[in-house]
Image: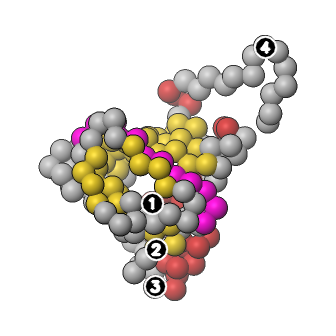
């Protein structure tokens, strides 16, 4: 998808093209998944209701992940410390870096999540929602397989 011309090449994506995965505690806006960026990066907006929580400490082997706080307060874990991040705060996590996030506040929070290269992370969020909506209860081994399929390794 590299562009080698002298004009054009940019891709505008109007808001009505952006898929939103609405869940009871979160809304994930697939602003620019890897399928749109030629796999160079992915960009999601992640909105959380008050007290939404978040994933436990984990890492990814094949992509970096960055978090930019838009609104509210998001607890971010950098592998060693938790910080209360607010609008304008940023966390970069290299591949293999342990991290976590959570909205424990009484207010909603919103952030951008950027990952590079553009792995198909939307599949992770969609499949996770399908498991929850179906009321499936996965065993530890099934969760481990699910996470490994999506390059997410949870620390216990």
| Residue under the image location 46 percent in, 85 percent down | 140
Which residue position holds label 4?
Answer: 7
Which element is circle 3 on? helix
Q: Position of residue 103 (x, y in %)?
A: 26, 53
Q: In the rendered view, would you say 8 is above or below 109?
A: above
The dot on residue 140 is: 3
Residue at 69% x, 22% y is: 10
Alpha carbons under labels 1 and 3: distance apart: 18 Å
| Label 2–label 4 contact, CB within 8 A | no
Give 112 or 83, whichever is nearer the viewer. 83
Residue 154 left/right relative to 41 = left
Q: Start and end of the magenta stretch?
A: 61-72
Cα distance in 3D space between marks 4 and 3: 52 Å
Rendered image quadrant of residue 111: top left
User: Where does the image place residue 58, in percent across and percent down from the top left?
Assistant: 45, 68
In this view, the residue farthest toward the top is: 7
Given residues 54 and 143, the one toward you in this image is: 54
Indicate which disc residue 154 carries: 2
Which residue lies at the image location 75% right of the left edge and 16% below the top edge?
Answer: 8
Indicate left or right for 122 with 109 as reference: right
Separation (CA) of disc 1 from disc 4? 41 Å
Residue 152 pos. (x, y %):
53, 67
Circles 4 and 3: CB atoms closer than 8 Å: no
Tag 2 secondary structure: strand
Q: Nearer the viewer, mark 1 or mark 4?
A: 4
For the C terminus, which image quadrant? bottom left
For the N terminus, the quadrant is top right
Eyeballing the image, is 121 above or below 132? above
The mark nearer the N terminus, 1 or 3, is 1
Q: Secondary structure at mark 4?
A: loop
| Residue underneath mark 1 | 129
What is the C-alpha distance between the residues marked 2 and 4? 45 Å
């Amino acid at each position: 998808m590299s562009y080698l011309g002298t004009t054009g090449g940019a891709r505008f994506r109007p808001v009505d093209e952006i898929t939103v995965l609405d869940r009871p505690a979160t809304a994930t806006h697939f602003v620019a998944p890897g399928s749109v960026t030629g796999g160079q990066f992915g960009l999601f907006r992640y909105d959380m209701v008050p007290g939404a929580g978040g994933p436990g400490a984990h890492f990814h082997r094949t992509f970096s992940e960055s978090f930019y706080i838009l609104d509210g307060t998001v607890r971010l874990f950098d592998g060693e410390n938790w910080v209360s991040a607010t609008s304008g705060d940023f966390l970069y996590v290299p591949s293999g870096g342990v991290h976590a996030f959570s909205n424990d506040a009484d207010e909603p929070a919103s952030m951008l999540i950027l990952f590079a290269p553009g792995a198909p992370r939307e599949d992770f969020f969609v499949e996770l929602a399908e498991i929850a909506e179906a009321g499936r209860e996965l065993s530890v081994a099934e969760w481990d397989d699910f996470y490994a399929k999506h390059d997410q390794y949870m620390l216990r």
